[in-house]
Amino acid sequence: MNDEDKSKVQLIRELAELRQHVLEFKARERKLLQEAKEALKESEEKYRMAFEWTGTAMMVVDEDTMISMANHKAEEVTGYPAEEVNERRRWPEFIVDEDLPRMLEYHKQRRIDPESVPNEYEFRMRHKSGEIRDIFINVSMIPGTKKSLISLIDITRRKKMERALRESEERFRNIFSQSPIGNALFGSDGKLTDMNGAFRKLFGISDDLSEKTPYDLFTNFNIPDEVIRILKRGKGADHESYFDFGAQGKGKVVFEKMGLRYLRWHLTPMGMESEKDPVFLAQVQDITERKKAEEAELKKVRAAANEAKRLAAGLKKEIIRLTSYHDIISRHPEMKKIFNMLPEVAQTTATVLITGESGTGKELIARSLHELGPRKKRPFITINCSALPDTLLESELFGYKAGAFTDAKKDKPGKFALADGGTVFLDEIGDLSPSVQVKLLRVLQEKAFEPLGDTQSITVDVRVLAATNRDLSALIKEGKFRKDLYYRIKVLSIDLPPLRERRSDIPILCDDFIETFNTRYQKKITGVSDEVLDTLLSYDFPGNIRELENIIEHAFIFCKGDLIEMEHLPLELGGEAKERDVVKAMSGVKNLKELEKLYLQNVLAETGGNKTLAAKRLSIHKATLFRKLKQLGITKK
């Protein structure tokens, strides 16, 4: 094979190889193209997904304003589904007429000079429902195209809130400015920052609120520190102040000369200037006329109350007067019967035996008989037959001559002699010894007696009244009282009922004792509480009227107010509450020392802290009491 043939074979081989390379290249090109298409498709799908699910309404708008693409979020903004928007509607269809010229101008200029128009702004668009929505838009151009990518955010709710807030602020401003009540705003430093006309007028402040007149809530207007502290804690506070507008020394405020004015402040923290200090709204009202009216009304009420107290006191006195008979107070029917018989009994000279329990007022009856009778200008002498031993009692009754016994230095007349022409009242006659009974019987029979140590009889004109709380009939049976004497002293008899049988007298007796003790203790107690009166009415009063008097006096010592309450009564009348207190106190006592301490504290409480009186009640010397108090650690009060 010649060289030429070899060259042709070589050329054919190279052409075949070249062809094979071309085929392989085309195959690779097709593969790369396919991969590129798949990658592009995948990329487009990713961007499509991002566009669709970005969370914001998105649209792509062509140069001719046609909407070429819209995601599903755009449906919420426009009200139209995406398939009804894409390639079917133009952007201006959704814009309200007022905003359309501006939006079209932006659309045009953005494609000429993007920097000349804003990328973000607000406009209004029409929803499918016909509702006008406020929209915030962000616009950008897609590189290398005349298309624009826009995102839409519905801000209708926010705009409504802003409008409502502006309207609310406007209303507040109108209320603040036009209110007849003085309104002012103060900063956290207390400086006045704003005020309405009523506030200016109220304090005489000029319209020029400058640095030259830095009115201060804390100093110029006399707001107390405790009110400011309440405000600092973020709470509102009410406060009343009293200004003499004609006085000097009110800081830098020059008030009009309007005299004394009463101002009502309501201070409210309105907001925080910082994390600590609020801004205050001060509402001030001139309540001078109301205050004056209230004071005038209060004076009337006080005057009426004083008049009512005066009338009540007068009524109580009148009731006591109408229910009194010679210092004996009662409205009980049995006592009324006794009152009716007293004048007749008083006119006689007959001996009268007055019986009744201790404390029922037997001596008062005896004194009334004396004062109602013809002997009222003569002596009335009382002898307590149980208070003296026989020897002394006999000398007290009948007197003695000098030398009758060792200490008898001179003559001494007895009670009967001193009472000549008058009345002798023998109290507790049931306690007389048999020997004295004999001598008394002679006086009653013969109107004569012999003083001790004398042999000559003395004749007297004496009316004898006797009283006892004992059963003389029983004493006669026991041989302790002479029957003949009994019949001598019981020519006439008066039996006084105990207080438990005349409970209706308890209220008027209380009033009478209160009036007496008010004078004695220089107090102004008006009465007893309903609870105290109920307690007294349910009590049996073994000591009768005398016990009631002691109870009221006990209450007077401890009562600091104008009404006697349960805590002022003695323990035996304090009811279950006091008993529970005692039991509770006793339950905590651990030893005798603590018991002694508790007892001394109770005695001091009952005597109002009076240690002299406490020592007497304890029957110990005052120095002993002070030593005990020191030992037990009871401090001096």
Image (cartoon, rainbow, N blue to C red):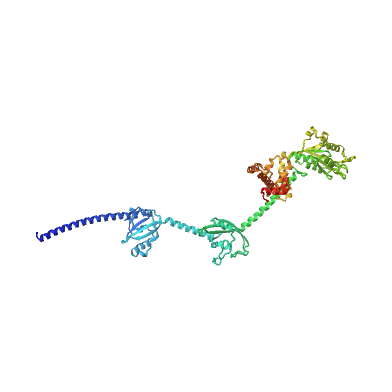
In the image, taking residue 506 as reference, residue 49 lies left or right, namely: left
Residue pictured at 13% horizontal, 59% vertical: 10
Q: Quadrant of the N terminus?
A: bottom left
In the image, taking residue 441 as reference, residue 260 lies left or right, namely: left
The vertical placement of 421 against 129, above or below, is: above
In the image, taking residue 46 as reference, residue 550 lies left or right, namely: right
Whole-percent x and y of residue 506? 71, 42
Q: Does the image show residue 10?
A: yes
Q: Nearer the viewer, residue 19 or 511?
A: 19
Residue extending farthest bottom:
212
The vertical placement of 583 against 176, above or below, is: above
Q: Does the image show residue 526?
A: no
Whole-percent x and y of residue 529? 67, 45
The vertical placement of 616 against 69, above or below, is: above
Q: Nearer the viewer, residue 582 or 458?
A: 582
Whole-percent x and y of residue 536? 69, 42
Residue pictured at 59% horizontal, 61% vertical: 222
Count of numbered tags:
0
Residue extending farthest top:
477
The vertical placement of 76 against 341, above or below, is: below
Whole-percent x and y of residue 433? 81, 37
In the image, taking residue 35 as reference, residue 394 lies left or right, namely: right
Q: Nearer the viewer, residue 18 or 328?
A: 18
Residue extending farthest right:
456
